[in-house]
Image (cartoon, rainbow, N blue to C red):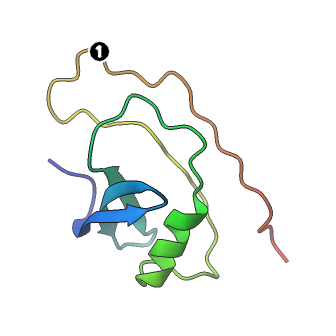
Amino acid sequence: MHPAGSRVAGGVGIDGRSYHVYLRRSQWNTITYLLTTGTTAVRHLDLQPLVAYAVSQGYIQDSWYLIGVEAGFELWRGGAGLATNSFSVTVAGGGPP
């Protein structure tokens, strides 16, 4: 099992973290950044380096709008004890012209 789409890159270093990157091209492109190692918490994640990477690879265009952000996990095997205790996002600037 893996995220939606195809793995397009592995072990990519972005802003001090290492990710496997999955891309699903459709009416709404979906980009999944999967940490290469497990973690118990992610705080103060800056989305700009992730967006800049996606633009540089041609996965998205810099003129497109961000319409959704999701975080958490999907159950692929097991899952005992997994939980998301909180999630929030703040997007600054970039509103319609």
Instruction: Please name the residue shown 46% across and 74% down the image.
Output: 54
Picture coordinates of residue 35, whole percent (x, y): 33, 49
Instruction: Please name the residue shown 39% across and 21% down the image.
Output: 83
Q: Would you say 58 lies left or right of 81 here?
A: right
- Tell me the element at label 1: loop
Q: In the picture, residue 22 is in which quadrant?
A: bottom left
Circle count: 1
Name the foreground residue: 90 vs 18. Answer: 18
Q: What residue would you read off at disc 1?
A: 81
Name the foreground residue: 3 vs 20. Answer: 20
Instruction: Decide: few, some or many residues near mark 1? Use Cα within 10 Å; few <14, some 14-19, many ≥20.
Output: few
Name the foreground residue: 72 vs 11. Answer: 11
Looking at the image, the residue that sits furthest to the top is 81
Looking at the image, the residue that sits furthest to the front is 16
Q: Would you say 23 lies left or right of 51 here?
A: left
Q: Would you say 31 lies left or right of 60 here?
A: left
Picture coordinates of residue 17, whole percent (x, y): 40, 53
Name the foreground residue: 63 vs 39. Answer: 39
Picture coordinates of residue 77, whole percent (x, y): 14, 31
